[in-house]
Image: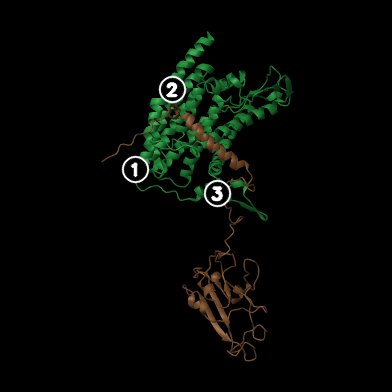
């Protein structure tokens, strides 16, 4: 018997994820440009403004992505003459939708108990409960891998259908790179599966929460974190792995022939993929939504207990998840503006000859440790 | 002959790549934090961007900007319509029509005045030859302003009234050069006998 409140909650969660992801993309565009300017001793975009009364409200340049969005909407949608029209229209869609869909299994908050909202949560809460996760699938994180695997198709057909040799090269490189790094991504997480004893992401977060700050994945599986982080940067084709887009080599790689909103969708898809991979990293390695010293009923620190009601704690949990994701995104962008681009053969070599053996080594060591500590 | 250049070997830390990334990130993150959290007005801020038009660079003292016609003490232009500037101008952007003073004027037969003095600032190449050619310090380019942009050609044609209304960079309309009018005790005289 499906209660109306659960349907409303589901729709609310889907809307939250959609709005979150769709507002993160323009904010990340702004952050990319301002952050790179701050690193490079310059100002970045600060001028786009809306005249309000007598002054020009500029919001530190946050309106520039809005201007970009308007530009994309009004630009001519040009399809090259001999290109495959259906594939040309399909590629951005196939590239963007899987990345948004991957957010479905990532928990962005703890379970909320609707009958105890404005009181301190008792030890054994009952009644209606809603988990802050759009869907709780029993395959858990394998769903994320399956869906991001679909994203490869978008890049590949974008390169193929453009009737452009540069685009084709970019598309082939994208496909090769993404498929290779998926293997490493999956294998580097096998150590996590062994440690957390589950495939479900909410179980992984619960495991980390049980053990406090030192139970976070980054302290228990540091090698897996480095491998997964590097692999996800490669998977989302960010610098230093942006060979498929190779700006100075391939015009624009596999989206050379795209303009207007289709190009906007590709760009958005790239930033959203970055958000999803950072959210996944937060959930797997940084304790997800948990805050050190904050239990479900308030702060427990150094013998003192500050009680907070359930709604406050839930909101703090969601905010902390977002804060951690934002910090990881900031670090990813720092890496973007610090490192030079890898050559394609270096990318492939790094995956198959360095990262894959390292992830197998991680599995081996984690297996031994888990076996001997759980015996 | 090809010369074999030895390739420098990477140390173990360099080959592992991650320590080098950390060093690079230290530089970048240090720069980022410094530039974000130092206010722009402080001495140690290293962002050199000039946020035009809210901030402007100060032009040097001898910068050649738009022309101005200097004034005499009574407000009339110092220019005597000798046509030296329009002759010297390589771009031929100065148009002067000289006119004679009336017969009752003390300066009649001694000087002329420009009835039309038009400079086309769009043709001007801002070389300063007109300033160097003028014997009366009547035209100067020390207004300290560059020609503001416009979308209409008519805005670039400055007539005598406009040119006389432009002050120098120090705000004055007259110059420090003395002007001896006939009738002044300092006037050296109109002819060789100092009459």
The numbered mark, 2 or 3, whose residue comes first in the sequence reads: 3
Query: Mark 1 sits on what residue?
Result: A165
Q: Nearer the viewer, residue A73 or A23?
A: A23
Q: Does residue A160 appear in this view?
A: no
Q: Residues within 10 Å of mark 3 (few under 14, many from 20)?
A: few
Q: Disc 2 is attached to a residue of which chain?
A: A
Q: Specify the colour of chain B.
A: brown
- Against A160, residue B100 (above or below) is below
Please tell me if label 2 and label 3 are on a single chain.
Answer: yes
Please tell me if label 3 and label 1 are on a single chain.
Answer: yes
- Could you say which disc has been placed on residue A358 in the image? 2
Name the quadrant containing residue A16.
top right
Q: In the shown orientation, is residue A160 left or right of residue B92?
A: left
Residue B100: x and y, percent? 58, 87
Which residue appears farthest toward the front when viewing the image? B193
- Which quadrant of the rendered structure holds the N terminus of chain A? top right
Q: Are marks 3 and 1 in contact (CB under 8 Å)?
A: no
Q: Nearer the viewer, residue A283 or B78?
A: B78
Q: Specify the colour of chain A.
A: green
The numbered mark, 2 or 1, whose residue comes first in the sequence reads: 1
Please tell me if label 2 and label 1 are on a single chain.
Answer: yes
Q: Disc 3 is attached to a residue of which chain?
A: A
At mark 1, the secondary structure is: helix
- Against A214, residue B171 (above or below) is below
Q: Disc 1 is attached to a residue of which chain?
A: A
Residue B54: x and y, percent? 61, 55
Residue A371: x and y, percent? 50, 11
Q: Residues within 10 Å of mark 2 (few under 14, many from 20)?
A: some
Query: Mark 3 sits on what residue?
Result: A67
The numbered mark, 3 or 1, whose residue comes first in the sequence reads: 3
């Amino acid at each position: 018997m499906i209660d109306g409140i659960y349907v409303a909650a589901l729709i609310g969660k889907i809307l939250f994820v959609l709005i979150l992801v769709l507002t993160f993309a323009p904010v990340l565009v702004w952050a990319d440009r301002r952050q790179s300017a701050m690193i490079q001793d310059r100002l970045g975009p600060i001028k786009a403004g809306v005249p309000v009364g007598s002054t020009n409200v500029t919001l530190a340049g946050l309106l520039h992505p809005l201007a970009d969005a308007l530009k994309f909407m009004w630009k001519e949608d040009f399809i090259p003459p001999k290109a495959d029209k259906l594939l040309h229209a399909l590629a951005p869609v196939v590239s963007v939708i899987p990345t948004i869909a991957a957010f479905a299994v990532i928990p962005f908050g703890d379970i909320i108990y609707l009958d105890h909202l404005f009181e301190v949560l008792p030890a054994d809460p009952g009644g209606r409960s809603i988990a802050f996760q759009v869907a709780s699938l029993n395959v858990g994180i394998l769903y994320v891998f399956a869906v991001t695997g679909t994203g490869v198709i978008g890049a590949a057909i974008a390169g193929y259908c453009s009737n452009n040799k540069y685009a084709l090269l970019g598309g082939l490189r994208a496909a090769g790179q993404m498929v290779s790094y998926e293997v490493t991504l999956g294998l580097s997480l096998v150590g996590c599966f062994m440690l957390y004893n589950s495939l479900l992401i909410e179980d992984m977060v619960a495991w980390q929460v049980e053990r406090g700050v030192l139970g976070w994945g980054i302290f228990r599986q540091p090698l897996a974190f480095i491998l997964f982080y590097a692999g996800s940067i490669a998977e989302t084709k960010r610098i230093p792995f942006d060979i498929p887009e190779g700006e100075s080599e391939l015009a624009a790689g596999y989206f050379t022939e795209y303009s207007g909103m289709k190009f906007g969708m590709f760009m958005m898809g790239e930033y959203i993929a970055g958000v999803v991979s950072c959210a996944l990293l937060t959930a797997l390695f940084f304790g997800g939504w948990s805050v050190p010293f904050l239990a479900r009923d308030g702060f427990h620190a150094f013998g003192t207990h500050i009680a907070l009601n359930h709604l406050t704690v839930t909101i703090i949990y969601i905010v902390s998840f977002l804060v951690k994701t934002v910090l990881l995104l900031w670090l990813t962008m720092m890496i973007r503006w610090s490192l030079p681009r890898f050559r394609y053969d270096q990318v492939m070599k790094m995956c198959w000859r360095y990262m894959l053996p390292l992830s197998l080594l991680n599995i081996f060591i984690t297996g031994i440790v888990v076996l001997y500590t759980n015996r | 002959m090809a010369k074999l250049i030895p390739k420098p070997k990477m140390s173990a830390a360099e080959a592992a790549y991650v320590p080098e990334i950390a060093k690079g990130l230290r530089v970048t993150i240090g720069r980022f934090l410094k530039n974000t959290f130092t206010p722009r007005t402080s001495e140690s801020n290293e962002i050199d961007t000039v946020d035009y038009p809210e901030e402007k660079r100060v032009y040097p003292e001898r910068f050649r900007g738009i022309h101005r016609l200097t004034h005499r003490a009574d407000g009339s232009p110092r220019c005597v319509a000798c046509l030296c500037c329009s002759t010297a101008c390589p771009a031929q952007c100065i148009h002067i029509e000289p006119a004679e003073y009336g017969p009752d004027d003390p300066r009649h037969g001694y000087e002329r005045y420009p009835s039309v003095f038009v400079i086309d600032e769009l043709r001007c190449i801002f070389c300063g030859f007109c300033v160097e050619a003028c014997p009366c310090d009547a035209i100067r380019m020390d207004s300290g302003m560059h020609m503001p942009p416009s979308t209409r050609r008519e805005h670039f044609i400055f007539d005598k009234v406009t040119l006389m209304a432009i002050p120098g960079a120090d705000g004055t309309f007259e110059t420090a050069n003395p002007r001896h009018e006939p009738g002044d005790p300092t006037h050296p005289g109109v002819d060789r006998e100092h009459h």
